[in-house]
Amino acid sequence: MKMPTLFVPHGGGPCFFMDPNGGPPDPMWRPMQDYLAGLIESLPERPRAILLVSGHWEEPRVTVHTGDGQPLLYDYYGFPEHTYRLRWDAPGAPDVALRAKALLETAGFPVAEESARGWDHGVFIPMKVAVPNADIPLAQISLRADLDPEAHIAIGRALAPLRDEGVLIIGSGMSFHNLRVRGTQATTPSDEWDDALTAAVTDPDPSTRARRVADWRSLPHAAFAHPREEHLLPLMVALGAGGEDKAQRDFAGHVLGWAVSGYRFG
């Protein structure tokens, strides 16, 4: 069956795993954790593999990771010591990575490959919740460092055939990502930004949807929501791969005073 594509929030650092005894996270993070925990069950069938693009990996040209993501890349700072010993030992999916590379090259994108980089926390933190048994192979691809929204939508379109091959395409980021603001000073502008972004993402006309999301800087509070847009660009890939399929908001919640959403295409 054809897989949907997803843009998921990956939280803040190791937010779901702060208790060294494995207890539940801060209640603020529980709705997001519950959403991620239900992702695989929500699909039409279990994917044979996942292709994930994270807001934490940028390269001059799109790069595919052909290894197994080990050792993990603990690219967060100032958290409890046990969070630097978290494990998520899923197998890599080099066949999917190379298939993605071929699709992108056919679409005219220069593509690099590497096998040594560990999976960053935009991969293993949400996937440790979504796939706790680490039993679905995963391949990661990078963002392109120019962060061009139209190019990343086109990258997603090029990858769309994977959906018919049992591969779940996931963009992992945050719909709001401004680490300088927390609490009530963020709530009203982030709500207004979130409403506008959701209206653009769920536009019923796929061409208009793509134009509106690519023009994200024109939305209310755009620069406030994303002083730098690397956490938004995975949405562009998921949207592009979603093609003409229906788009919907899949998650809505508040963390740190921020309105945060997740989206599904198909």
Image: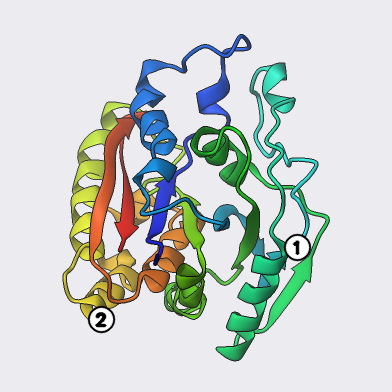
Kind of residue sitting beneath label 1: Thr
- Which residue in the protein does label 1 denote? 66
At a point 81% along the width and 60% down the height, the residue shown is 115
- For this rendering, which residue is in front, 123 or 80? 123
Q: Which mark is residue 207?
A: 2
Secondary-structure class at tag 1: loop
Placement of 21 over or under 206, stated as above or below? above
* CB under 8 Å between discs 2 and 1: no
Q: What's the residue at 70%, 18% (across, down)? A: 82
Q: How is the image coloured?
A: rainbow
In-image side of 93 versus 198 (left or right): right
Between residue 99 and residue 125, name the one nearer to us. Answer: 99
On-image quarter of the C terminus: bottom left
Query: Is residue 220 at least partly visible in the picture?
Result: no
What residue is drawn where x is 55% and y is 41%?
127
Position above or below: 195 against 66: above
Q: Quadrant of residue 101?
A: bottom right
* Secondary structure beneath label 2: helix
The residue most toward the right is 116
Local crowd at mark 2 within 10 Å, few (<14), some, or many (≥20)?
few
**Left/right of residue 150 with respect to residue 259 in the rendered view:** right
- When the figure is inspected, residue 105 is found, relative to residue 70, above or below; the finding is below
Query: Residue at 32% across / 66% down in the picture?
Result: 216
Q: Of circles 2 and 1, which is in front? A: 1
